[in-house]
Image (cartoon, rainbow, N blue to C red):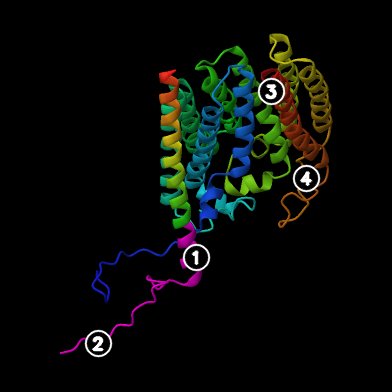
Amino acid sequence: MREPAVAKPPASNPFNEPPEVARARRSRSWAIALGLLAFVALVFIVTLLRLTHNVQ
Amino acid sequence: MTDAAGMSKVERTPSPASARDYISLLKPRVMSLVIFTALTGLVCADMRMDPVLAAIAILCIAVGAGASGALNMAWDADIDAKMRRTRARPVPAGRVSRGDAAFFGGMLSLFAVMLMGLAVNWTAAGLLAFTILFYAVVYTMWLKRSTPQNIVIGGLAGALPPVVGWAAATGTAPLNAWLLCAIIFMWTPPHFWALSLYTSGDYARAGVPMMPVVKGAKSTRLQILVYSLILAPLGFAPVLTGLGGPVYAAVSGFGGLLFVFLAVRLFRSRAGEQDDAGEGVLYGPKADARPARDLFAVSILYLFALFAALLFEHGLQGGA
């Protein structure tokens, strides 16, 4: 027996959220991505500075 | 539970919180004052410090202050919901859950303290951790709801950033650093009580025992005067210890006199005794509220001018 066809949500909105919720989730995701990137950059810079100071 | 696609589904309402809501959990305006006073402490230490590490130290202090704000909003959501000034904040408005706000604040606290310790020094990291704990636990969870001395003792958390900044630069916290802390500590009660004299209705509704709510307006005005009389000479003390130069002497001398003058005027007024502005008005003019509003405004300018003068004098010295 064939299962009833299930309407697939559009790729741009995989969770079938209202537009304002999707927009809020996207902004949170961007903030997390930028935050992580900044953290990695910060740790890299601190490592370089500490290494340089120790060598000097 | 599974959905039509066979994926496991967690029962959770989708969060409408945007990144901006999380930023507002950090209380950016309070953060800017913390950055300013911490930077002054760091510059006044007169110790040559790598500018990038100095910037990282200030970032850690700012993030630590923001984290305290998020922890405060998580704990105080019930109070915030009852006050007109705070009811639109993300937690009482229902955009961010208390758990998410607490987790956010906790993670940022850890991040700020660990980075401060690893990148700068552990004295500054320890002081920063103490500041966050003091604000989140001692002030927010304990004092705020239990005593009218809440902002007096809790004010220590807001007064510590210059000491943290100083410790970031030198690894120590000498007398002059604690002098800056003492100035902010003594400044906090007259500043907040002047505000609460014309917003006490809001605090009473929320059950927060602010001084005008518990002891009345007259007692509050007297206490504002007493604190102001201590603050004015204390504000001048850095001149005597050599921390402040001629610019600072002029600013603290004139500012202190103006502060005391406005405190005397407030004491002689009836500010806080009448509330005929109606329900819908929070900061609107109330009968005889002017002296309280003036002192509140001048108190902000006074503290800003003192620290700006120090920053100017020591910044010039460092640049010369």
Residue at x 76% of width, y 48% of height: B275
Residue at x 47% of width, y 44% of height: B75
Q: Residue B315 shows which numbered tag?
A: 3
Q: CA distance from mark 1 to mark 3?
A: 44 Å
Q: What residue is pinned by disc 4? A: B274
Q: Label 1's element?
A: helix
Q: What residue is pinned by disc 1? A: A23
The foreground one among B72 and B303 is B303
Instruction: Pick out the residue farthest to the bottom.
Output: A1
Quadrant location, the N terminus of chain A = bottom left
Residue type, mark 3 in image:
Gly
The residues colored magenta run A1-28
Q: Label 4's element?
A: loop
Sequence order check, earlier mark of 2 and 1: 2
Residue B248, x across and y down, in percent = 76, 19
Q: Is disc 2 in the same subunit as disc 1? A: yes
- Which chain letter matches label 4? B
Residue B294, x across and y down, in percent = 80, 37
Q: Label 3's element?
A: helix
Q: What residue is pinned by disc 2? A: A4
Residue B239 visible somewhere in the drawing: yes
Q: Main secondary structure of the magenta part?
A: loop
Judge whether B289 appears above or below B178 on screen.
below
Q: Is disc 2 in the same subunit as disc 4? A: no
Instruction: Pick out the residue farthest to the left.
Output: A1
Residue B16 visible somewhere in the drawing: no
Q: CA distance from mark 1 to mark 4?
A: 46 Å
Q: CA distance from mark 2 to mark 4?
A: 70 Å
The foreground one among B57 and B199 is B57
Residue A15 colored magenta? yes
